[in-house]
């Protein structure tokens, strides 16, 4: 360090750089900012000023290097050390299922874990770090050779110029997607219009053009972003699974692709497609599908690659269509759990041969983020079966200053005070007697997923509620055919008798259907079935503690707390008591053993498995436990009967000892099942 620079200045420079890197990590990687944008800008301004006074102390990885240097004369092509292959894709659910079946067969029934990611519609790129420093950034190019775009990638604030570790790998290449948010495109197009320039059509076009611009100063102004979703060539970096890799790169300061889910079977992954498509609607960046990858790197190696794509991953794409139309009004609707959902009413527009006049705005935060106002021109997208969504506002077409939408503070139906979820984005009406909630709850109660009451449709429910004939679920079972004929429009004697019979038949659906139907937050058909396997009666479920509920495999603390709170709330208890009083079945039938068969040795027992086992793979011992009547949980609690512990059993073993849970070796486990 030159002696002309005071030590205090050098130390302050280093402190500023460390602080800015810390706040970049908090904002871009962890999504948990600790300071305001203004405070962040003050740190940047101070760093710029000090570096201008002491240019000899500027380092290549300084955050100020993101502002862009002089234009490069041309792009240089560089060979990838490992080819950047494309992804095989399908638009068909049947083809996706066939792919999973082929992969299961290729691996000869080895247990495969699957990772689901959103397929970000951006531009593929790789980042190369040597000894922790960013040395090169490349486009995918033709897969074998890419363009060197280091000068533009260095301007992306998501991309660390130096990894956040004192012991970086010798060589690390990560791969991902450069993209722009819809919000940033709206702001960019506003600036384009103010400068008399043409607006950009979509985020991908902007990103692709910006990536290859020769002037990094242009890139620095456009606020591109980066998500990492894959690994290239590495030295001194080890990960055995994709989930482990994503966790490790996040700790290094590189933002991992968001919303990743892990499934323990292809069947579970396939079953989650519908819910995954719904999640896509809430993202602020363009997504054109889902990507499914084998989690275990060892299994990826066994599967290998085709000439152009890996066998261990596939993209399930959805066709997207969009149009521009005017927003005529914003209204709010009340859902079955009280969620207040804003809906955009649009000037009718044709999208993919469908006339669209309404679109989802999701929540109050989404309205604020989009800065959408009545009278705006908006871009509406429809993808696959997804409900149309307002993607962004064409702010440059705003002809006058439009008033901001004021989200209501009281329920539009019952005038109760609205409450925001603690730490969440949803605003709710908490009045269980709200007629709007009652309508929604009754519709879901009668649905196929709920109690499957045929012929009880929306119009009949509206009249039943409006006339005060039904104020809760159990009132349905007190209805008489003659009063339906007398008071409900369009219900004649034959239909009335059929409806009463359907309502009566629903009494025997069983506890899983009841739990699905009565609008407990986070409880759908799958969760209800899981709960009733462990708690086959409503009494057992109501007596369970949050810890006992959370210990059930696939449940966890959020669902557990929701179920517990419902069961112990005044509304929940009244709901259960009412259904019990009218004779609705609140138990689950357990399959009876075949005549002459012996009782299963593990019947009713809960197991947790931990550590490395000698004789069994994890999935094998879980299957064995279930075959002998037991069930497997992922966490230790007071309701756990046995912990099967192998080598390197960690915190679960200690907790089992603290709770007095019996610990079994593999030999003792085999003795228990009579092996």
Image (cartoon, rainbow, N blue to C red):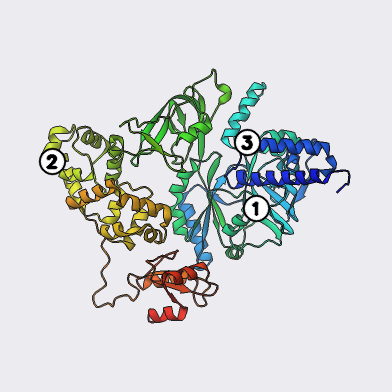
Residue pointed to by mark 1: 85
**Where is residue 254 shown, x and y percent of the image?**
65, 50
Residue drawn at the location 38% of the way across and 49% of the way down? 522
Q: Nearer the viewer, residue 372 or 359?
A: 372
CA distance for labels 2 and 3: 64 Å
How many marks do you count on the picture? 3
Q: Quadrant of residue 512?
A: bottom left
Position in image of residue 497 (x %, y %) = 14, 43
Q: CA distance from mark 2 to mark 1?
A: 65 Å
Quadrant in which the C terminus is drawn = bottom left
- Up-down relation of residue 68 to residue 292 (above or below): above
- Relative depth, front residue between 145 and 599: 599
Q: Circles 2 and 3: CB distance less than 8 Å?
A: no
Disc 2 target residue = 481
Label 3 vs 1, first from the N-terminus: 3
Q: Secondary structure at mark 3?
A: helix
Q: Residue furthest top?
A: 400
Between label 3 and label 1, give the one nearer the viewer.
3
Query: Residue 341's spot in the image, x, y percent?
Result: 40, 35
Q: Is residue 29 above or below residue 590?
A: above
User: Residue 410 falls in which quadrant of the image?
Assistant: top left
Mark 3 touching mark 1, by CB under 8 A? Answer: no
Residue positioned 47% across, 55% down in the render: 269
Crowd band around label 3 with a 10 angstrom C-alpha radius: few (<14), some (14–19), many (20+): few
Query: Which residue does the numbered mark 3 point to in the structure image?
Result: 37
Q: Residue furthest right?
A: 3
Labels 2 and 3: the sequence-earlier one: 3
Q: Is residue 336 above or below residue 594?
A: above
Q: Is residue 213 left or right of residue 341?
A: right
């Amino acid at each position: 360090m030159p002696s002309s620079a005071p030590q205090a200045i050098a130390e302050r420079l280093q402190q500023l750089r460390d602080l800015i890197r810390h706040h970049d990590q908090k904002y871009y990687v962890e999504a948990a900012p600790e300071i305001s944008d203004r405070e962040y800008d003050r740190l940047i301004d101070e760093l710029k000023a000090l570096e201008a006074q002491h240019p000899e102390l500027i380092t290549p990885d300084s955050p100020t290097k993101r502002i862009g240097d002089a234009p490069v004369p041309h792009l240089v092509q560089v060979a990838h050390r490992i080819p950047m292959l494309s992804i095989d894709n399908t638009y068909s659910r049947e083809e996706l299922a066939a792919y999973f079946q082929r992969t299961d067969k290729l691996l000869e029934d080895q247990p495969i874990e699957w990772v689901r990611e959103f397929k970000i519609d951006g531009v593929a790129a790789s980042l190369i770090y040597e000894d922790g420093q960013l040395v090169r950034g490349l486009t995918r190019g033709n897969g074998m050779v890419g363009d060197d775009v280091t000068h533009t990638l260095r301007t992306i604030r998501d991309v660390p110029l130096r990894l956040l570790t004192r012991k970086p790998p010798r060589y690390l290449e990560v791969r991902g997607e450069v993209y722009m948010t819809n919000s940033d495109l709206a702001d960019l197009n506003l600036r384009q219009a103010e400068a008399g320039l043409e607006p950009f059509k979509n985020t991908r076009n902007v990103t692709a053009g910006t990536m290859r611009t020769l002037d990094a100063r242009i890139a620095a102004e456009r606020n591109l972003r980066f998500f990492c979703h894959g690994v290239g060539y590495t030295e001194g970096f080890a990960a055995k699974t994709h989930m482990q890799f994503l966790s490790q790169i996040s700790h290094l300061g590189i933002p991992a692709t968001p919303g990743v889910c892990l499934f323990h079977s292809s069947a579970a992954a396939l079953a989650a497609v519908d819910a995954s498509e719904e999640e896509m609607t809430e993202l602020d960046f363009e997504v054109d599908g889902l990507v499914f990858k084998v989690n275990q790197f060892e299994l990826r190696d066994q599967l290998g690659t085709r000439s152009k794509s890996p066998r261990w991953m596939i993209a399930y794409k959805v066709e997207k269509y969009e149009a521009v139309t005017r927003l005529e009004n914003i209204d709010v609707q009340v859902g079955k759990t009280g969620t207040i959902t804003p809906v955009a009413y649009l000037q009718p527009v044709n999208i993919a041969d469908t006339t669209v006049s309404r679109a989802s705005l999701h929540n109050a935060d989404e309205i604020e983020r989009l800065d959408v106002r009545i009278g705006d021109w908006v871009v509406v997208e429809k993808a696959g079966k997804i409900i149309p969504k307002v993607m962004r506002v064409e702010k440059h077409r705003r002809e006058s200053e439009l008033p901001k939408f004021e989200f209501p503070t009281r329920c539009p139906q019952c005038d109760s005070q609205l409450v925001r979820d603690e730490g969440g984005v949803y605003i709710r009406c908490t009045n269980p007697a709200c007629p709007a909630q009652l309508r929604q709850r009754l519709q879901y109660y009668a649905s196929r997923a709920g109690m499957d009451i045929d012929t009880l449709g929306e119009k009949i429910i509206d009249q039943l509620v409006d006339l005060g004939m039904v104020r809760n679920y159990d009132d349905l079972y007190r209805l008489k055919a003659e009063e339906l004929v007398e008071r409900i429009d369009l219900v004649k004697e034959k239909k009335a008798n059929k409806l009463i019979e359907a309502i009566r038949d629903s009494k025997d659906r069983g506890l899983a259907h009841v739990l699905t139907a009565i609008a407990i937050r986070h409880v759908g058909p799958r969760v209800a079935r899981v709960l009733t396997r462990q708690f086959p009666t409503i009494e057992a479920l109501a007596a369970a503690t949050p810890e006992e509920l959370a210990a059930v495999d696939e449940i966890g603390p959020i669902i557990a707390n929701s179920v517990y709170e419902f069961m112990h709330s005044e509304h929940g208890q009244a709901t259960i008591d009412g259904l019990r009083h009218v004779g609705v079945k609140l138990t689950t039938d357990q399959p009876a053993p075949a005549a002459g068969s012996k009782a299963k040795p593990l019947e009713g027992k809960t197991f947790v498995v931990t550590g490395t086992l000698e004789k069994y793979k994890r999935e094998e011992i879980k299957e064995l436990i279930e075959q002998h009547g037991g069930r497997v949980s992922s966490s230790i609690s007071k309701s756990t009967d046995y912990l099967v512990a192998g080598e390197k059993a960690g915190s679960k073993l200690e907790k089992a000892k603290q709770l007095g849970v019996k610990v079994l070796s593999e030999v003792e486990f085999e003795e228990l099942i009579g092996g």
